[in-house]
Amino acid sequence: MKKLLSILLFLACLGWGALFWLNQQAEARLAGLHSQLKVVQADNERLKEATAKAESRRAAPDDALKRELEKAVEKIHGLQFKRAVNYRTMPSSEFKGFMSKKIEEAYSKEELAIYSRALALLGLVGEGTDIGQMILKLYNEQVAAFYDQHGGELYTFSDFSLSENIDRMMLAHEITHALQDQNYTLKNFPLELKTNDDLVLATAALVEGDATLLMTLWYVQTLSEGFDFQSLFKDLGAMFGQNTEQLAAAPAYFRDSLLFPYMQGNEFAMALYLDGGYEAINKAFEKPPTSTEQILHPTKFAPNREEPIEVQLPELKIEGWKPVFHNVLGEFGVRTLLTERVTRFEATQAAQGWGGDRYQVFEDAAGKLALLWVTVWDSEPDAAEFHKAIDAALHKRLGLTMARRAPDAGGFASFGNDKLHVALRKSGARVTVVLGTKASVQRIVAALPK
């Protein structure tokens, strides 16, 4: 028994000893952890200070780079900033809402709906196309930074960085807009005119073409100062790596309209630059281009400026119908419309003699639309070339075989199907097109002067 008790007492003592030892170890570890916690807290404080200093150091170079870019833009452009550029930062998630608000301020829902349906009736977009949503999708995909001429603010997104040449080049583009605005007041330009798409595109081509040329000149100058293939290929990779799914899927008219100010605008600005340097471009802002014809053919802007012909539509009184919208396609719009149905060469040739145009949209009580489009050409041969091309394009659109049709007393040849009817007339250097249902086309034709 004593032996058993001795063993139990030994085990108990061993257990209490173990517990005492474990307790001592735990207290020691707790004391160690407490000390480590103090060290970590001290490290965190030092880390916060270091992070704040790093953020400050990073902000300082970004601000310095912006000033450097502003000076480079001034030097290339030959203009001076009149005040500090107002930079703003926006989270990418807020851009769609910002753009939606801008569209709502410019257009009512009814205006956008009529505009969309008018382009569909012309054959430039598919039926049911929502212009507002299309614009949002395209700009949401393409924009990296932007300048708002209404507020005089240059926006970059929260994740925008100036660490690479390509980023600085894009900012140089937007800084150019700020320079344009301070010297020429962009909000006074017809960039948001609702009744002349041709004038809007021509103006945008000057504004964007100038900025695109300048950022290109800046990039070439920067690259020449410290050329290395690695940087070049990295920049090219960033350019080609941009998401363009929405752009590729968009109707040709929207895609080409979005690209026109940058591509053709750049060619236009380059033509002016090669002829008279940036002085010629600055002079163009004093009397901007008024048609896409001038953008596509810079010699029609300078030295021999050819202004578009202002087409006056007759005031038609058609029982049950009212005019609800009017606009101008211009040479670019005509070419794009024809390219949908004839070859690009034929479309380009047929559109080149453009002198002026305007179309009027009518609506009846049931909400159906009809359209009158009057075009004026530089000469009768130019009008004949367009007449032939638009005749072929409309026949192809309707799935009809070309055939000679005797004109009516007013000189119109008519054809169509149950869904869409066409009346087409060439008179001297003028070509008139009427689109709609058969009954609406007949009413418009009957109301027109003979």
Image: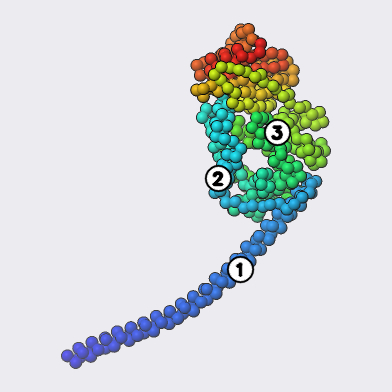
- Whether residue 61 is visible here, answered yes or no, is yes
Q: CA gap, disc 2 to disc 1?
A: 36 Å
At 76% from the left and 38% from the top, the residue drawn is: 285
Give the residue number, with chain letter if any, for mark 2.
97
- Residue 351: quarter of image: top right
Q: Position of residue 385 (x, y in %)?
A: 69, 17
At x 82% / y 31%, what residue is drawn? 303
- Dot 1 lies on which element? helix
Q: What is the three-letter code of the residue carrying label 3? A: Ala
Quadrant placement of the C terminus: top right
Question: What is the x, y in percent for residue 272?
Answer: 78, 36
Image quarter of residue 19: bottom left
> Measured from the top left, where is residue 410 in percent x and y?
64, 10
Is residue 340 shown to the viewer in this render? no
Tag 3–tag 1 contact (CB < 8 Å): no
Question: Based on the displayed image, in which of its 4 quarters is residue 283 positioned?
Answer: top right
Please tell me whether residue 191 is drawn above or below residue 58 in the rendered image.
Answer: above
Q: Amino acid at mark 1?
A: Ala
Q: Secondary structure at mark 3?
A: helix
Do the residues under discs 2 and 1 have CB atoms within 8 angstroms?
A: no
- Which residue is found at the position 69% from the left and 59% from the top? 61
Q: Earlier in the sequence, mark 3 or mark 1?
A: 1
Determine whether, in the image, residue 150 is placed left or right of residue 4.
right
Give the residue number, with chain letter if any, for mark 1. 50
Point out which mark residue 273 bears: none
Q: What whole-number distance in Å separates the C-alpha atoms at marks 3 and 2?
A: 28 Å
Closer to us: 95 or 166: 95
Question: Pointer 1: residues within 10 angstroms few (<14), some, or many (20+)?
Answer: few
Q: Residue 156, relative to residue 315: is it above or below? A: below
Q: Which residue is mark 3?
A: 202
Q: CA distance from mark 3 to mark 1?
A: 51 Å
How far across and down, in percent of the image, does residue 90 sit? 60, 51
